[in-house]
């Protein structure tokens, strides 16, 4: 019941006129920026970081909660009304959503996405409240060796589970880890600073995030800009008929059930649950023939899964300090900007702040629903923004945000350099997420690793802690050898079953 | 999932981005405009060259392979290898080597009983791992592996990289970085937005200037004065 009291206190913190205004502001600009083509949720949060620089942490987090859900919702609007999905998590939504929009049912597609997101977001946030306390008390019992193992698991998982090519994932991860090494070490030694005084304090994670997500993306799109912008399907106010409600509510719930657990475990991501939800709905639907031609279940389920998974990622992010998707990684960078390190201690040290954040997730979600149903036509107009202005604007705001972190022009050169790195990674199909996770978690992993070895006097057995670390190392091993198991065990077995 | 071996960026039949899991999900239809424009691509593709980029991200000596005859429909069983990827391997190996060099020569010896590991081993380990990854990457490329260029709403992968636009954008970016302290955000930001819009092909010079000035002024007043964010006033100090 402690949780409930904490949560109620959190609500009390949010429900002041000023803070509600911040929540509304966050939801509005989050959606507005998230709707813009080419801007995914992670870039939305990264670009809007400077907006919160001058604020108190509580207000900043209230706004972030709004930006977080707003950016998510904006992304799905884009993929329904435009032909091509922006990020992998909305690929599945786009399949049916765009078909629905083309056959004149854009209003229903947007409505089921908006209401489904609200339902999934609310349920998932309730689950977050339920799960987070046991998670935190478990996390507090962990020692440095366990944390070290957990971070290795996060590295291996974001690298080897998500994404198509492992070697490219590990290349990206190592580049991120190396960026994280730059600066003064805990012993006072300069590492990889190349004699540049501005690098002594290390590279700010915000600069890295803005560079990789915003500048790299803008340059990449500019290099391949569609000369004829994709067609936008006009839409009126979203609404659903009785039939649509009947066909939507079960997929919403099933999607939530898929999304939350996948988001909550390190490296679940949103791709797998959205896809699973799509397949399930197709199988269970009474109208399987509509799939591929605009079935509402195919929007309702995956969209709910996507949102529930986003809320799920907040569990490891808040309780363990482990970001498992790009948006959570940027959120974590935002926390660090305020000198706040997510993890179990956060709940004892900054209890009121965390619960305010969680309460504002509920409120942001509700505001989003209220705001989005009537405003959808306005968001759809944003999709027609001339592309030169859009991408010039991204570079403009990215430069402003990166400069404002430390007020030094050096950061702008850094921004460009890392932006070009992001550009090259997009060209060669290197995944972005491992790099960001490496930059954020690398220094922490080193800290915990070295702390573990301190007790054993440098002997490697110091890295093995209690049973938790054994379990985690076993999980890492499974993730690493999984393709081999697939090749040498599963396939021959299946072959024998077929032939024999 | 194995690596994509098709070359969506080389024109021809362009497969849409596959969902993350092998699937029975129907592919997202391409835009009609994309497909019709595709056949004209290979002719220009050979002419594009990678100009010199700052050292950190020189993706490769040449982004597109040499202008060998590149039939439109070569996306079939044997696609052309993406040799520029060897540049990525070289870049990774170079970074790995530099990290090891820095760790072994520049980082002092600071081992104590409180910290038996010291600052050196981690960078050395990372450098060695990066060298190994670079080698495996090279083997993967030699065996025909390719990375899948990132798709997106406004990304038309059937066209070659438009280096002119990219370089102009970098130029606008650098102008801002050099001038921001001297002239202040309002002027340098105006130049940045106007230059970027120009680079991206917008030719409404006057309208863009008005938008750029308005954006810079609004952000300066809202962020620097309203929220106390660090943005320099520069030469306009006292006027703004």
Image: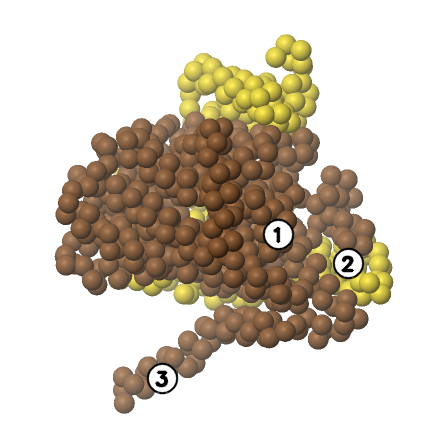
User: Which colour assignment does the render follow?
Assistant: by chain
How far apart are labels 2 and 3 at the CA level? 48 Å
- Judge depth for marks 2 and 3 and give the one in front: 2
Q: Is residue A186 left or right of residue B162?
A: right
Q: Chain B is drawn in which colour?
A: yellow
Q: Where is residue A156 in the image (x, y as percent from the top left)?
A: 54, 64
**Residue B133: which numbered mark, if any?**
none
Residue behind mark 2: B119
| x then y, percent, for residue A268 | 44, 60
Q: Mark 1 points at which residue?
A: A348
Q: In this view, does A229 lie above or below A315?
A: above
Q: Badge 2, how many Cα within 10 Å: few under 14, some, many 20+? A: many
What kind of element bears circle 3? helix
Kindly report which numbered mark, 3 or 1, lies closer to the viewer in this rendering: 1
- Secondary structure, mark 1, is helix
Chain whose colour in the figure is brown: A
Q: In this view, does A359 lie to the left or right of A117?
A: right
Instruction: Point out residue A327 in the picture as x, y percentages from the top left corner.
Output: 48, 47
Give the mark, 3 or 1, whose residue is nearer the N terminus: 1
For image coordinates 71% across by 61% down, the residue present is: B122
User: Which residue lies at the image location 46% right of the left edge and 73% below the top edge?
Assistant: A482
x, y percentage for residue A479?
A: 50, 70
Q: Which residue is under mark 3?
A: A493
């Amino acid at each position: 019941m402690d949780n409930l009291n904490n949560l109620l206190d959190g609500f009390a913190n949010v429900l002041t006129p000023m803070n509600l205004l911040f929540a509304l502001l966050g939801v509005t600009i989050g959606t507005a920026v998230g709707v813009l083509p080419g801007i995914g949720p992670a870039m939305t949060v990264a670009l809007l970081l400077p907006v919160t620089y001058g604020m108190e942490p509580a207000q900043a987090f209230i706004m972030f909660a709004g930006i977080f859900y707003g950016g998510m919702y904006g992304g799905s609007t884009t993929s329904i009304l435009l032909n091509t999905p922006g990020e992998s998590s909305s690929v599945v939504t786009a399949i049916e959503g765009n078909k629905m929009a083309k056959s004149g049912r854009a209003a229903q597609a947007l409505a089921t996405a908006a209401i489904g997101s609200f339902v999934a977001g609310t349920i998932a946030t309730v689950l977050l409240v339920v799960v987070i306390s046991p998670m935190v008390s478990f996390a507090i019992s962990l020692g440095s060796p366990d944390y070290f193992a957990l971070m290795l698991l996060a590295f291996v998982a974001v690298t080897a589970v998500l994404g198509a090519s492992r070697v490219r994932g590990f290349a990206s991860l190592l580049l991120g880890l190396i960026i994280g090494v730059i600066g003064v070490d805990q012993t006072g030694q300069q590492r990889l600073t190349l004699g540049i005084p501005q690098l002594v304090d290390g590279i700010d994670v915000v600069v890295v995030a803005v560079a990789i997500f915003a500048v790299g993306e803008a340059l990449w799109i500019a290099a391949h800009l569609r000369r004829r912008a994709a067609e936008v399907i006009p839409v009126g106010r979203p609404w659903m008929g009785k039939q649509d409600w009947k066909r939507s509510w079960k997929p919403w719930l099933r999607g939530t059930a898929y999304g939350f657990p996948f988001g909550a475990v390190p490296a679940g991501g949103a791709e797998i649950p959205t896809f699973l939800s799509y397949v399930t709905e197709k199988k269970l639907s009474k109208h399987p023939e509509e799939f591929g031609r605009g079935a509402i279940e195919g929007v309702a389920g995956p969209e709910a899964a996507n949102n529930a998974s986003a809320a799920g990622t907040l569990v490891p992010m808040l309780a363990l300090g482990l970001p498992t998707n790009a948006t959570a990684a940027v959120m974590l960078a935002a926390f660090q900007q305020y000198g706040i390190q997510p993890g179990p201690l956060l709940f004892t040290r900054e209890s009121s702040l965390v619960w305010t954040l969680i309460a504002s997730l509920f409120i942001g979600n509700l505001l989003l629903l209220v705001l989005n149903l009537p405003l959808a036509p306005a968001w759809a107009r944003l999709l027609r923004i001339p592309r030169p202005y859009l991408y010039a604007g991204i570079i403009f705001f990215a430069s402003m945000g990166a400069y404002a972190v430390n007020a030094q022009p050096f950061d702008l050169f850094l921004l460009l350099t890392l932006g070009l790195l992001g550009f090259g990674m997009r060209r060669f199909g290197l995944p972005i997420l491992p790099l960001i996770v490496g930059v954020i978690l690398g220094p922490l992993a080193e800290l915990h690793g070295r702390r573990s070895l301190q007790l054993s006097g440098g002997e490697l057995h110091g890295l093995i802690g209690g049973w938790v670390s054994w379990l985690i190392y076993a999980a890492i091993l499974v993730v690493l050898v999984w393709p081999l198991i697939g090749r040498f065990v599963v396939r021959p077995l299946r072959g024998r079953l077929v032939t024999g | 999932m194995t690596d994509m071996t098709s070359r969506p960026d080389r024109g021809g039949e362009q497969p849409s981005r596959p969902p993350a899991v092998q699937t029975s999900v129907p592919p997202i239809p391409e835009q009609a405009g994309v497909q019709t424009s595709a056949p004209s691509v290979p002719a220009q593709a050979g002419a594009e060259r990678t100009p010199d980029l700052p050292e950190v991200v020189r993706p490769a000596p040449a982004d597109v392979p040499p202008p060998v005859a590149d039939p439109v429909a070569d996306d079939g069983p044997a696609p052309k290898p993406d040799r520029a990827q060897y540049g990525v391997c070289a870049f990774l190996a170079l970074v790995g080597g530099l990290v090891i060099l820095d760790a072994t020569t520049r980082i002092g010896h600071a081992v104590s009983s409180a910290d038996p590991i010291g600052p050196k081993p981690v960078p050395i380990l990372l450098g060695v791992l990066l060298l190994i990854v670079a080698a495996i990457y090279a083997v993967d490329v030699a065996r025909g592996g390719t990375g899948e260029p990132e798709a997106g709403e406004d990304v038309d992968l059937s066209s070659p990289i438009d280096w002119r636009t990219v370089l102009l954008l970098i130029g606008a970016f650098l102008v801002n970085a050099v001038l921001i302290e001297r002239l202040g955000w309002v002027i340098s930001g105006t130049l940045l937005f106007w230059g970027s819009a120009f680079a991206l092909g917008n030719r409404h010079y006057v309208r863009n200037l008005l938008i750029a000035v308005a954006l810079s002024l609004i952000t300066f007043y809202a962020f620097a004065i309203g929220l106390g964010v660090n943005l320099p006033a520069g030469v306009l100090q006292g006027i703004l």
